[in-house]
Image (cartoon, rainbow, N blue to C red):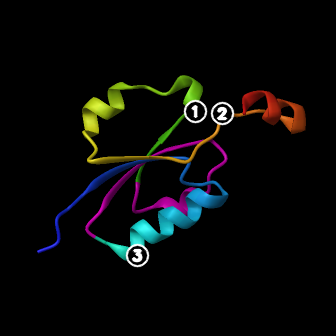
Amino acid sequence: MIERKRIFLLGGTGFIGSVVTRQLMTGRPANELVMLIHRRARLQDLEQINTHTGSLGSFDLSLLDQYRPDTIIHLARMSGRGRIGRYLAA
């Protein structure tokens, strides 16, 4: 019997995160994914995932109490506009 895992994923729609998300969805279909996504994410790609819109700067920690994840995967970066904004956020 496959044990069901609840995974909270931050940054699952980015360059690396989108690959990790696909692997988690196809590798073990028993996983339950909960994701924090930004406004520009393609929701069509995330229909099977429980999503919450927001950013790392405004992340509501009560979501962790609500979902009680077994694992947290953090692939997100702070937002920044333009080359200088991304540099400052990093």
Which residue type does callout 3 highlight? Thr
Whichever of labels 1 and 3 marks the residue nearer the N terminus, that label is 3
Q: How far, Cα to Cα, is label 3 from label 2? A: 28 Å
Q: The C terminus appears in which quarter of the rendering?
A: top right
Magenta highlight range: 30-49
Whichever of labels 2 and 1 marks the residue nearer the N terminus, that label is 1
Q: How far, Cα to Cα, is label 1 from label 3? A: 26 Å
Residue at the image point whose x is 81% and y is 34% from the top: 87
Task: Provide the secondary structure element on which disc 1 rests.
Answer: loop
Nearest the eye: 40 or 13: 13
Which residue type does callout 1 highlight? Ser
Query: Can you identify the residue that label 3 sits on?
Result: 26
Q: The N terminus appears in which quarter of the rendering?
A: bottom left
Query: Can you identify the residue that label 1 sits on?
Result: 55
Q: Is residue 90 left or right of residue 63?
A: right
Coordinates of residue 35 in the picture (x, y in percent): 45, 47
Looking at the rendering, which quadrant does residue 64 occupy?
top left
Task: Provide the secondary structure element on which disc 2 rests.
Answer: loop
Question: Contact, CB < 8 Å: mark 1 with mark 3?
Answer: no
Q: Assess disc 2: are there few (<14), some (14-19) or many (≥20) residues with their C-alpha within 10 Å of its C-alpha.
A: some
Query: Can you identify the residue that label 2 sits on?
Result: 78
Q: Assess disc 1: are there few (<14), some (14-19) or many (≥20) residues with their C-alpha within 10 Å of its C-alpha.
A: some
Question: Contact, CB < 8 Å: mark 2 with mark 1?
Answer: yes
> Disc 2 or disc 1, which is closer to the eye?
2
